[in-house]
Amino acid sequence: MKTSISFLSSQYSFDKTIELINKSKADFIHVDVMDGLFVNNRTPFDKSMLDTLKNSRKPKEVHLMTLHLKKFIDVFSYIKPESIIYEFEATSDHNKLIKYIKSKEVKVGIAINPLTNIDLLIPYLKKINIILVMSVIPGYGGQKFLKETTERISYLEKIREEQDLHFVISVDGGISEDTIKSLKENKLDRIVAGSYVCKSANFDKQIEKLENVVK
Ligand code: DX5
Ligand code: ZN
């Protein structure tokens, strides 16, 4: 299982948090982007933050919780991410958007809201690389993990196996040593952890605690 760290709710400054993630054993930096439209919260990024991310050692996954997706894809392509993940509910033209992200030579991910039916993803599963199952309503860090997530991931795994597909399954929101226990039986490829890691004095210790539960 790979770990991706969201710096959205950290006890440290942006620069310090990125430095701590870079020094840690995390596999990815998870970049949460919010526009105040698709979600109420807004996460402004200036040029210097984009440069810090661009030059960071770890690969980045960009999680767009925005409308105006093309504009944000253009802006965040600059940091040379491994993947760009958009919210399924933010567009109706998935084929066009998937193509657009691929044109940036970046992997494509779709995030799905806890209230959206997983079956709606089926037509696109062949074309994408990552499904990010949201285990909280997108918008804020530090929310409570929704228990239904376990079943939703199992269902997605079943579809992946039956159709012999190879997309990565990741989960985002409310992950802690305690909540990750309910995902023990899932074949999770990746997890996103935010406050559990970034509100601690020792990032590696927290990551190891998560890894040990699913081992
Ligand atoms: C929620 C974000 C998540 C979240 C993760 O809208 O996409 O990435 O901030 O943070 P924690 O782990 O604190 O829920
Ligand atoms: Zn996220």
Image (cartoon, rainbow, N blue to C red):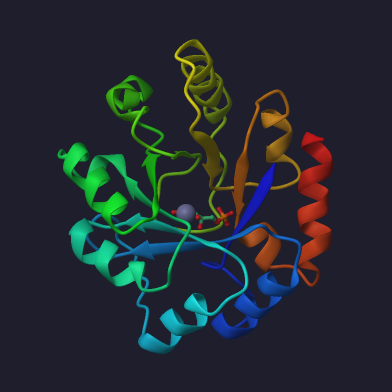
Residue at the top extreme? Answer: 162
Q: Is residue 86 something that shows in the picture?
A: yes
Position of 155 compared to 63: left or right?
right
Q: In terms of image quadrants, where is residue 43?
A: bottom left
- x and y percent of residue 62 in the render? 43, 59
At x 51%, y 82%, the residue is 52
At x 25%, y 55%, the residue is 38
Q: In terms of image quadrants, where is residue 105?
A: bottom left
Residue 101 vertical placement versus 154 (above, below): below
Q: Quadrant of the N terminus?
A: top right
* In the foreground, 46 or 59: 59
- x and y percent of residue 183 in the render? 67, 30
Residue 22 vertical placement versus 81 (above, below): below
- x and y percent of residue 64 in the render? 35, 57
Position of 93 compared to 166: left or right?
left
Q: Is residue 42 something that shows in the picture?
A: no
Residue 12 vertical placement versus 190 (above, below): below
* In the foreground, 116 or 167: 167
At x 53%, y 15%, the residue is 161
At x 26%, y 44%, the residue is 98
User: Across the whole image, how many numbered discs are drawn on residues?
Assistant: 0
Position of 163 compared to 97: left or right?
right
Q: Quadrant of the C terminus?
A: top right
* In the foreground, 163 or 25: 163
Position of 158 compared to 207: left or right?
left
- x and y percent of residue 153 in the render? 53, 26
